[in-house]
Image: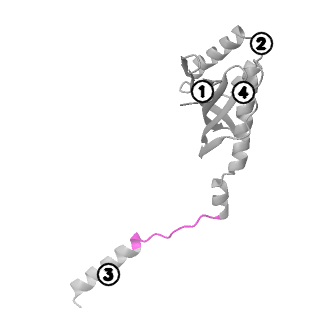
Amino acid sequence: MSNKTLSIFALTLLLIIISCKKIETPTPTQTSEQTVNIEEEKKAILEALNSETKAAFERDYEGWKEKWLHDPNITKTYINFADSTFSESVGWDKISLFVKTFIEEHPEPEPIPKLLKEIDLRLYGKGAWVTYELKDSIRGLKRETRLMEKINGSWKIAGMQTTIYGFETDKN
């Protein structure tokens, strides 16, 4: 083997050795920090949603606002097929004002719908996408989608879309 061939071989071997990285396996501590207990998160989200619903129907503005993320980019949308109405509020200030005004104009509590026991849940780190159906005695069948964010260990509502179908159960 010539010196030139030997030099090229040695350089190639050196580059291969340098470029190889040790594959690290996570230690038990790293793994446990990344593990999410889906049932615990689901229970906490159900608690937040049910508390927010109870507060709204009981006309408890302070209790209701505790469950929401106070951010200028959140949304609250209602689509009511039963009476062909639509409303959308964007940003905490508008959502808060909408609910506060509604409570002032309708101070009498409404019957609390059956509280949620089951939701469809997708967890994304500190965020969650939640959908469910419920019936209330005044509006009938509703399908809700909630965007949730976990802030300082508590789940907060960061978006809400409610479709009201009324008392007809055919959603088509």
Tell me, for residue 108, which label it has, or none.
2
- Name the N-terminal-most of marks 1 and 3: 3
In three-dimensional space, the C-alpha distance between marks 2 and 4, rounded to whole angstroms, equals 15 Å
- Name the N-terminal-most of marks 2 and 3: 3
Q: Main secondary structure of the magenta part?
A: loop
Instruction: Bin the neighbour count of mark 2 within 10 Å (Cα to Cα): few under 14, some 14-19, many 20 and up.
Output: few
- Give, as a three-letter code, the residue at label 4: Thr
| Foreground: disc 1 or disc 4 | 1
- Name the N-terminal-most of marks 1 and 2: 2
Between residue 14 and residue 55, name the one nearer to us.
55
Name the spot of residue 115 as percent of width and height, x first: 75, 33
Q: Is residue 17 above or below residue 59?
A: below
Q: Is residue 108 above or below residue 126?
A: above
Q: Which residues are magenta?
A: 18-27
Residue at image position (54%, 17%) is 84
- Give, as a three-letter code, the residue at label 1: Thr
In three-dimensional space, the C-alpha distance between marks 1 and 4, rounded to whole angstroms, equals 13 Å
- Give, as a three-letter code, the residue at label 2: Glu
> To which quarter of the image does residue 151 belong?
top right
In three-dimensional space, the C-alpha distance between marks 1 and 3, rounded to whole angstroms, equals 68 Å
Q: Which residue is mark 4?
A: 53
Instruction: Bin the neighbour count of mark 1 within 10 Å (Cα to Cα): few under 14, some 14-19, many 20 and up.
Output: many
| Secondary-structure class at tag 2 | loop
- Give, as a three-letter code, the residue at label 3: Ala
In which quadrant of the rendered image does the N terminus lie? bottom left
Question: Does residue 159 show up magenta in the picture?
Answer: no
| Secondary-structure class at tag 1 | strand
In three-dimensional space, the C-alpha distance between marks 1 and 2, rounded to whole angstroms, equals 22 Å
Q: Which residue is mark 3?
A: 10
